[in-house]
Image (cartoon, rainbow, N blue to C red):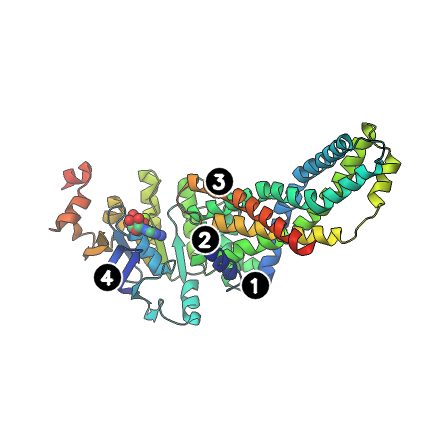
């Protein structure tokens, strides 16, 4: 479980996050949703330690990530896996080397074990026979799968995904969502997904936090969200015609 | 000035939280190939022509019955060692390797590959930049030595080919009143220039933000800033060491 308390972050004089708190449970897909520019990525970066919040705490199963000594933060880092918006695969490495990379850096296991783990993860994300391919030879959806495989290869307890659907066609997007949901349940990870895709919200939103201008305006699940009375959330949900019709 | 401070902090950050030495070893070998071996062609071409042109121009400007022909190769030798090989090749190096480093790091930054390294707990600046700087320090002096050799050889060929000097006199001039300190001087310069190009270009690339356009700008800035720094350092080193 990941708990955040009163996370505040400013850039120069611009306040981006205004004291955000919440709980993201284990084995669930937790969504952070909101329009572009509301600070979702900044919040995610504060969570994984790419940015340090000005105020507030991030607790990974009770361990304070923001203030603890180096030993604990290093340990937490080892348990974090992240899928980036553009997949962020290393251009100069092939698929196998990309997925193996966290093991090279973080573990002391033998080369043979590493390759076994890589193949196991490739299997989990539904890819095979791509070990020797370079990232430039992969389609967008395959890149995301490789990105996910890299994020979970070191038995990550916490999985973070920034806009896993961006740049994908609707069908592939749903497949990636399903994969994230399936892996979360299978591997019992605490998964946090940043998205503005309503499809994902309905499909995999077991816990949803809605951000608007850097504030948390609503939290709940995908059953409650369609009945909300909050104006900002409503206009976010029903911004496209299809959703209006469904309503 | 603010950027200079940031640059110094960047250099310090390279030595914090390093990875296993083994990791750096293979990275450095890779960089040596990219930085050194891949620059060999352009450095050779530039050097041969540099030597040839210097020979012909010196010959052209030194006509007169009182001046012996071997002065030509003496001038070529000193110019090559003191200035042309270290400095001109450093500028070529900035254009080729500097822009490449900044482009590579800039792309890694905007495609979040650097963030991906950081999330895994890797000190990305040290992991990515230190091997480049070490490789530049290892390879650039070698390139300068090769360059000087080829320039002098280019001068010989051009001189003999166009009949401005005989081969014997050219060799005599090369050996005439040779100041051995010129060689360590050239090497000191090449270490300094290698460090300047690799570190400034890395700095520019590492702190890219935005999109593809900014990556292009970082590459350009890497080359211009490296060139300016090379010329300033060239002047300072000449003041101190000569
Ligand atoms: N490194 C940064 N420096 C300054 N401002 C930033 C930085 N990162 C993000 N911002 C600002 O924070 C706001 C939220 O950005 P972001 O979290 O990326 O939005 P999104 O919800 O679309 O992911 C934006 O207005 C952006 O301009
Ligand atoms: Mg974002």
Please rate how many residues cluster around mark 3, counting C-alpha atoms within 10 Å: few if below 14, some from 14 to 19, many from 20.
few
Residue occupied by mark 1 = B20
Secondary structure at badge 3 equals helix
Label 3 close to label 1 by CB (< 8 Å): no
Secondary structure at badge 2 equals helix
Are the numbered discs 3 and 4 placed on the same chain, yes or no? yes
Disc 4, ligand 1: is the CB inside 8 Å?
Answer: no
Say left or right for B63 vs A16.
Answer: right
Say left or right for B209 vs B24.
Answer: left
Chain on which label 4 sits: A
Q: Say which mark, if any, is on residue B3.
A: 2
Chain on which label 3 sits: A
Outermost residue, right side: B168
Secondary structure at badge 1 equals loop
Earlier residue among tags 2 and 1: 2
Residue occupied by mark 3 = A136
């Amino acid at each position: 479980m990941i708990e955040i308390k009163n996370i505040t972050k400013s850039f120069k004089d611009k306040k981006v996050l205004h004291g955000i708190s919440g709980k993201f449970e284990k084995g669930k897909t937790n969504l952070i949703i909101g329009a572009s520019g509301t600070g979702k990525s900044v919040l995610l970066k504060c969570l994984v330690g790419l940015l340090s919040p000005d105020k507030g705490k991030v607790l990974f199963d009770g361990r304070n990530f923001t203030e603890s000594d180096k030993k604990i933060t290093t340990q937490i880092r080892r348990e974090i896996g992240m899928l980036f918006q553009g997949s962020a695969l290393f251009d100069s490495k092939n698929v196998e080397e990309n997925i193996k990379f966290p093991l090279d850096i973080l573990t002391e296991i033998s080369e043979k074990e590493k390759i076994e783990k890589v193949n196991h993860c490739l299997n989990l994300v539904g890819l095979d026979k791509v070990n020797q391919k370079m990232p430039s030879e992969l389609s967008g959806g395959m890149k995301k799968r490789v990105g996910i495989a890299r994020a979970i290869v070191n038995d990550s307890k916490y999985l973070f995904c920034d806009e896993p659907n961006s740049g994908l066609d609707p069908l592939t997007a749903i497949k990636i969502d399903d994969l994230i949901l399936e892996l979360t349940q299978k591997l019992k990870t605490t998964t946090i997904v940043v998205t503005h895709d309503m499809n994902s919200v309905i499909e995999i939103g077991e816990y949803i936090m809605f951000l608007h201008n850097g504030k948390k305006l609503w939290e709940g699940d995908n059953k409650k969200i369609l009945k909300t009375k909050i104006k900002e959330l409503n206009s976010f949900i029903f911004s496209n015609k299809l959703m209006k019709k469904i309503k | 000035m603010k950027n200079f401070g940031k640059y110094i902090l960047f250099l310090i950050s390279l030595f914090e939280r390093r990875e296993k030495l083994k990791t750096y070893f293979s990275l450095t070998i890779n960089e040596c190939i990219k930085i050194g071996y891949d620059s060999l062609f352009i450095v050779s071409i530039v050097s041969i022509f540099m030597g040839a042109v210097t020979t012909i121009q010196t010959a052209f400007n030194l006509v007169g019955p009182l001046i012996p022909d071997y002065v030509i190769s003496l001038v070529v030798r000193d110019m090559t060692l003191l200035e042309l090989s270290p400095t001109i090749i450093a500028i070529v190096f900035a254009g080729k390797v500097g822009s490449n480093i900044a482009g590579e790091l800039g792309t890694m930054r905007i495609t979040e590959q650097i963030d991906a390294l950081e999330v895994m707990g890797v000190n990305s600046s040290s992991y990515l930049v230190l091997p480049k700087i070490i490789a530049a320090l290892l390879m650039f002096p070698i390139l300068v030595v090769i360059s000087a050799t080829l320039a002098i050889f280019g001068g010989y060929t051009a001189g003999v080919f166009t009949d401005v000097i005989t081969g014997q006199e050219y060799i005599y001039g090369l050996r005439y009143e040779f100041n051995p300190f010129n060689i360590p001087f050239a090497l000191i310069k090449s270490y300094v220039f290698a460090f300047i190009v690799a570190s400034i270009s890395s700095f520019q690339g590492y702190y890219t933000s935005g999109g593809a356009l900014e990556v292009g700008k970082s590459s350009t800035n890497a080359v211009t800033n490296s060139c300016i720094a090379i010329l300033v350092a060239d002047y300072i080193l000449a003041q101190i060491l000569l």
